[in-house]
Image: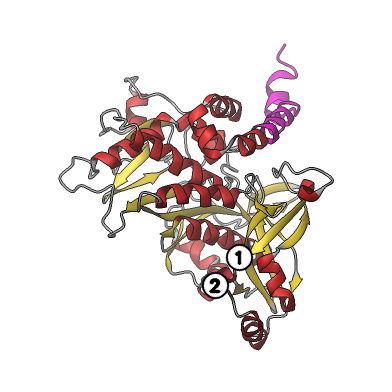
Amino acid sequence: MYNYPALITALKARGIHSLLPQFTDLHGVAKGKLVPVENLQEWVEVGAGFAGPSIWGTGLPRFGARSEYYGRVLPETIRPLPFMPGVAHAVCDGFAGEQALRTCSRQLLKSAVEKLSERGWTLWVGIEPEFFLLNKRGGQWQVADAHDRLDKPSYDLKSIHRNAAYLEDMRQTLAGLGFELQQMDHEDATGQYEINYRFDHALAAADRFMLFKLAAHAVAEQHGMVFSCMPKPLAHAPGSGLHFHLSITDATGVPVFADAADSVGLSRAGHSFAAGLLEHADALAALCAPTVNSYKRLASSASASGTTWSPVWKAYGNNNRTCVVRTVAGRMEWRLPDPSCNVYVALAATLLAGLDGVDRALVPPAPCNEDLYVVAAGGGVLPDQLPRSLQEALAALAADAVLTTSLGQEFVDQFLAIKGVEWDSFHQHISVWELERYATLY
């Protein structure tokens, strides 16, 4: 039990008058409302109430006991927001009818983590957020820094100098929210940055990424820019990934994946986990790369920088960034996700797919020790490719009975229905490319 009067007094002593209970909808977008801090016990034990059908992906009805979505505040996640004086952020778990909501993405990840805990194992996740700083000029979306024009802009210090005020505000804001920052750099596309911070256990890592996005949106807006998690806003430049660095420890803290004597540094369980990821990669694409635009990133297209890091092929290899699974230092880098994903769902599905590989003792193909882009350019034999479109990925998810059962049919049904409408909507749109190519050709 919590000492609510003491918690409320402590928050008020820090100038906090309101809480921002935040949950995450099916699209991975943060949602919430402002509530008075005086009613903290209600927000923790009952939850802040929201109209269930107004939230993407809940599947809740418009009337009855289960029409209300309750976001129950987790007191240990309460943190004052530097960019909203007097307001503290709090992570919520979704409930309906006084039961954990099976379509709540955070509840999905909790359930997956509990399955792992039954083995005495803990999943540790390092998340690498890549993003663009954009704005709209003359009705057109553009890179916010008009002077950021290099063909190969990775680690460009001039861009960092021009945007030092934004980066410093981000540093101060994230430090104030308890992030242990590791680095900030300019990435391989104009207007693209990456900010890295310390890894954590799976649920905390997902919570922290959502808080990162909330802060990044607010700080960018203060600087007249848009923080964008669009996977590929620039046609001839690399897109943004959201790579997951995955490692598992047992009850004694010993790494489960690592074997220094192995050619790629993985134990037998590590190889089987990687095999599970490759086995379910097509279905995982729907959840880790969940937008129409995601598949512009997942394509072996030319880049102005001369380099592309897109994980197009279903392969794994030691420190091989051309594979969808890169092994490094006894852990795995899962390179499929992009920052448009619902991080809770993507992590839950990734974990469940890997565990399926462990349970079935799956054996992956031989590790790849070639640059697959060089192989492709030379017409060599390539591993199977990931889905080329959201439609293909959705079909793969619908056909993957193992992953669907593990995640829960209720959630998967909601996801397929909503994303199916997104795909249909895309095909009702006539692009400028189509008009330019076909309007006068025939």
Query: Neighbour class for label 2 at 10 Å: few (<14), some, many (≥20)?
Result: some
What span is colored magenta in the figure?
A: 416-442
Identified at 70% across, 25% down, the residue is 436
Instruction: Please say if 442 is above or below 185.
Output: above
State whether residue 165 appears in this view. no
Query: Neighbour class for label 1 at 10 Å: few (<14), some, many (≥20)?
Result: many
Q: Residue furthest left?
A: 261
Q: Position of residue 35 (x, y in %)?
A: 75, 70
Nearest the eye: 172 or 250: 250
Q: Which residue is mark 2?
A: 177
Identified at 82% across, 47% down, the residue is 64
Does residue 54 appear to the left or right of 371 in the view shown?
right
Does residue 313 appear to the left or right of 413 in the view shown?
left
Q: Which residue is mark 1?
A: 215
Give the mark, 1 or 2, whose residue is nearer the N terminus.
Answer: 2
Nearest the eye: 68 or 257: 68
Does residue 98 appear to the left or right of 304 in the view shown?
right
Q: Position of residue 57 (x, y in %)?
A: 69, 43
Nearest the eye: 371 or 397: 397
Q: Nearer the viewer, mark 1 or mark 2?
A: 2
